[in-house]
């Protein structure tokens, strides 16, 4: 196996952990999300670490292109060297409401069911998402979920591997 194969294998591991993050986010299971996120942080960091160890000059020329590296490296370092990474979950509830507007005719006319009316459902939907401690302190991260940020970082690292391959 080549260094590029090794890097791609670790990226695949990060994608696997990201998928687990997405699944546990959808169900709101915080512990599973936190475990998957911790594994994601380690596997995604190893990709760039392999590049650094293999060819520092190529690594140095590319690493500044990774916009999200700093935040994920800091989270990984905290998780490994200081304390378990802290995430918070939040939720939103969407409620579908049906309103009948009277056109001035009798109440009996307004309550008749139209044969073309379709049932809309479900009427309530819960949606969960996760953020990391201090995420709202950085304006560019405020409008994204942790899963969305991780997905963006995976895309960056994928490009990093391709660019690294061209330089070695």
Image (cartoon, rainbow, N blue to C red):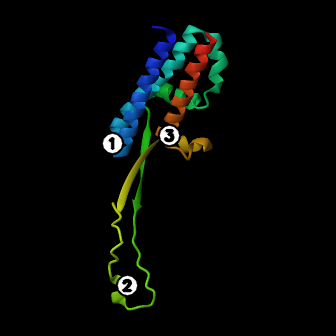
Instruction: Identify the residue at image location x=43%, y=46%.
Output: 129
Q: Is residue 71 left or right of residue 18?
A: right
SS category of the residue bearing label 2:
helix
SS category of the residue bearing label 3:
helix
Which residue position is annotated with label 2?
110
Q: Is there CB contact under 8 Å for labels 3 and 2?
A: no
View extreme (right): residue: 61
Q: CA distance from mark 1 to mark 2?
A: 44 Å
Which badge, 3 or 1, is on the more N-terminal residue?
1
Instruction: Identify the residue at image location x=58%, y=14%.
Output: 165
Which badge, 1 or 2, is on the more N-terminal residue?
1
Q: Residues within 10 Å of mark 1 (few under 14, many from 20)?
A: some
Asked whether the viewer can see residue 81, the reply is: no
Which residue position is annotated with label 3?
148
Instruction: Identify the residue at image location x=32%, y=78%.
Output: 113
**Which x, y percent locates residue 114?**
35, 77
Which residue position is annotated with label 1?
29
Q: Nearer the viewer, residue 87 or 99?
A: 99
**Which x, y percent locates residue 24?**
35, 40
Of marks 1 and 2, the one in the foreground:
2
Q: Residues within 10 Å of mark 2 (few under 14, many from 20)?
A: some
Of marks 3 and 2, the one in the foreground:
2
Residue 67 sits above or below residue 112 on the image: above
Quarter of the image for the C terminus: give it: top right
Q: CA distance from mark 3 to mark 1?
A: 17 Å
SS category of the residue bearing label 1:
loop
Q: Nearer the viewer, residue 86 or 158?
A: 158
Residue 128 sits above or below residue 17 on the image: below
Q: Is residue 159 left or right of residue 125?
A: right
């Amino acid at each position: 196996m080549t260094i590029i194969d090794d890097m791609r294998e670790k990226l695949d591991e990060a994608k696997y952990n990201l998928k687990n993050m997405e699944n546990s986010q959808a169900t709101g299971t915080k512990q599973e999300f936190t475990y998957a996120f911790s594994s994601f942080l380690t596997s995604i960091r190893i990709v760039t670490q392999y590049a650094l160890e293999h060819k520092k000059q190529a690594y140095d020329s590319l690493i500044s292109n990774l916009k999200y590296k700093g935040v994920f490296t800091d989270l990984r370092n905290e998780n490994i060297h200081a304390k378990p990474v802290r995430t918070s979950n939040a939720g939103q509830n969407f409620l579908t409401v049906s309103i009948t507007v009277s056109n001035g005719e009798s109440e009996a006319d307004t309550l008749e069911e139209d044969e073309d009316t379709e049932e809309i459902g479900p009427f309530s939907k819960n949606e969960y998402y996760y953020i990391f401690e201090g995420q709202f302190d950085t304006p560019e991260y405020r409008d994204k979920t942790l899963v969305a940020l991780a997905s963006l970082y995976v895309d960056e690292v994928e490009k990093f591997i391709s660019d690294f391959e061209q330089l070695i």
